[in-house]
Amino acid sequence: MTKRIAVIPGDGIGPEVTEQTIRILEKVHPGFTYDHFNLGAEHWLATGEVLSDETLARLEKVDAILLGAVGAAPGSTTIPSGLLERGLLLKLRFAFDHAVNLRPSKLYPGIPTPLAESVVGGKTIDFVVVREGTEGLYCGNGGSVRTNTAHEIATEVSINTAHGVQRVVRFAFELARTRNKKLTLVHKHNVLVNAGGLWRRIVAEVGEQYGDVTTDYLHIDAATIKLVTAPDSFDVIVTDNLFGDILTDEAAAVTGGIGLAASANLNVDGSFPSMFEPVHGSAPDIAGLGKADPRAAILSGAMLLDHLGYDDDAARIRTAVESDISASLDATRSTAAIGDAILAVL
Ligand code: IPM
Ligand code: MN
């Protein structure tokens, strides 16, 4: 049976990078159907609608979702901050129960990194952040009272459930088992004693079933240091939603930039479609100029294939992107030219 992919190109460079991704997917795995959904800043400006229940119900029926990027330019006066983030991107992650936000980081040979040669030279930097996707400070559990007065009170309360933490921790242990068998919990349990305590206990409990996996722990602040001083020491990192958000931007920066950082929002029980998107945003400053690097989106497409069970096709994309990377180290190429080059390798 043919798989149905929903495509949400979104804003800014989103449409440019998803277009290239679909070309590559059609080449390595012909026969999917692609339904385009026009959502994002433009759509909101034109219709006043962010994501209707009807659209959500249509999206629920597909096999996977490919998303480009959503969001207006920072400082935009026409689109309120958070409207698209909360109303579209996070709404999809929550509605479709994307428990795991999976973000691999790998430094490919020859790719420039801001890290010193003494840190990266001769080392393998290849780790995965397993970011919790449905809880933490992202829940929208807060409010504002006495707003716009000198006594304004604003709260954002972090939600951490045993169920939510268990499922992401279990996923991370399973993943570590297929890799170098090392799992690092990142949190801040010396200050966030309640949430941190829960995460710590669950890692210890679940870890009893994974005797082959070594576990360790870092506070988030220390983790940001270690990511630039000893990035080769990581294998699998498991962490909450906000720490994972911050750490994966840093991880992308140290492993060759956001142009190569892919991600998957995984529904772990198959109850709803999973969603695949580059870590980067809509980059309004370069939108429409054909300057965006589509490889983060293309590698997210490979994660989509993995998720649907087409591991060999996913591996072909990764190999083609890797060979494109090593063949084009000094080249300045357009978005489409990068797509062409990867297609040519395939
Ligand atoms: C990301 C983004 C989103 C997040 C924003 C756009 C809501 O930064 O995917 O990392 O914070 O999760
Ligand atoms: Mn982010």
Image (cartoon, rainbow, N blue to C red):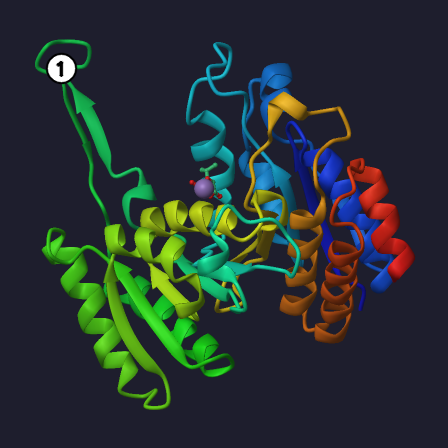
Q: Which residue is pictured at 32% across the width and 62% down the height?
A: 164
Element at label 1 = loop
Q: Is mark 1 within 8 Å of ligand 1?
A: no
Q: Can you give x and y, in whole percent of width and height, for residue 118 in the image?
A: 45, 59
- Corner quadrant of residue 222: bottom left
Q: How many marks?
A: 1
Quadrant holding the N terminus: bottom right
Q: In the displayed structure, does residue 189 sit left or right of residue 268?
A: left
* In the image: residue 146, left or right of residue 40: left
Residue 266 shows in the view? no
Q: Is residue 136 visible?
A: yes
- Vertical order, 246 against 310 (above or below): above
Residue 212 position in % (x across, y down): 37, 90
- When the figure is inspected, residue 126 is found, relative to residue 22, above or below; the finding is below
Q: Position of residue 275 (x, y in %)?
A: 58, 53
Residue occupied by mark 1: 146
Q: Does residue 66 appear left or right of residue 320 in this picture? A: left
- Residue 18 versus residue 212: which sits nearer the camera? 212
Quadrant showing the C terminus: bottom right
Q: Amino acid at mark 1?
A: Arg
When asked about the image quadrant of residue 335, the answer is: top right
- The extreme front residue here reads 118
Q: Residue furthest left?
A: 151
